[in-house]
Amino acid sequence: MLSTSKATTILPVKDMDRARGFYEKSLGLTPAGPMEEGSFLFSDDGHNGIELMLKPESGPSGNTELSFEVEDIAMELGALESQGVRFEDYDLPGLKTVNHIAEHDGLKAAWFTDTEGNILCLHQVLT
């Protein structure tokens, strides 16, 4: 029933200008414009989007908030690094990154944070 519904991920931000700059310039997302006072939408297709919501007192959840599926994770990672995005490395039981990329259960994944501390991910489905 909801599989064809419009979906928007809402991320809390403390500094809207800083966050907008990161999503637009570093990640290359298409700005759709303000939604209401204190929020801003990025959407390329008008059906799915990322909304930044000004929440000065809130903090990130500590979990991955959003994952972008990509065809070539190494290429995308390199392109984002050239825009100043810094990727995380992990060495945990069941999760170890090599050159910022973890491989597990048919996926490759790499994590980074936005300027507000929200954890974002790139993932590639392996065939």
Image: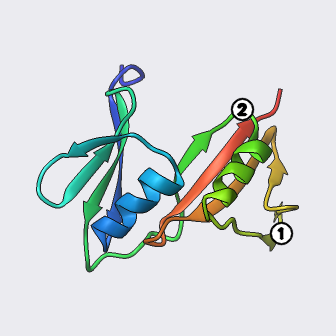
Measured as percent of width and height from the top left, residue 50 is found at: 37, 46
Residue at point 80% right, 56% down?
A: 101
Q: Are marks 2 and 1 in contact (CB under 8 Å)?
A: no
Instruction: Please tell me which residue is depicted at 83% across the width and 62% down the height of the picture.
Output: 97
Q: Could you say where residue 59 lies in the image, as x and y percent from the top left?
A: 38, 76
Quarter of the rendering occupied by the C terminus: top right
Residue assigned mark 1: 93
Q: Position of residue 46 (x, y in %)?
A: 31, 28
Q: Is residue 70 above or below residue 34?
A: above
Instruction: For marks 2 and 1, give the one nearer the viewer.
Output: 2
Q: Where is residue 78 in the image (x, y as percent from the top left)?
A: 74, 52
Q: Is residue 28 above or below residue 58?
A: above
Residue visible at 81% across and 33% down in the picture: 126
Query: Residue 82 occupies which quadrant of the picture?
Result: bottom right
Q: In this view, does 46 lie to the left or right of 90?
A: left
Q: Quadrant of the N terminus?
A: top left
* The image quarter in which residue 98 lies: bottom right
* Residue 71 circle label: 2
Query: Badge 1: few (under 14), some or many (20 or more) residues near its Cα, within 10 Å?
Result: few
Residue extending farthest right: 98
- Under mark 2, the amino acid is Glu
Q: Which of 97 and 2 is in front in this view?
A: 97
Label 1 secondary element: loop
Disc on the earlier residue, 2 or 1? 2
Q: Which residue is found at the position 71% from the left and 55% from the top?
A: 110
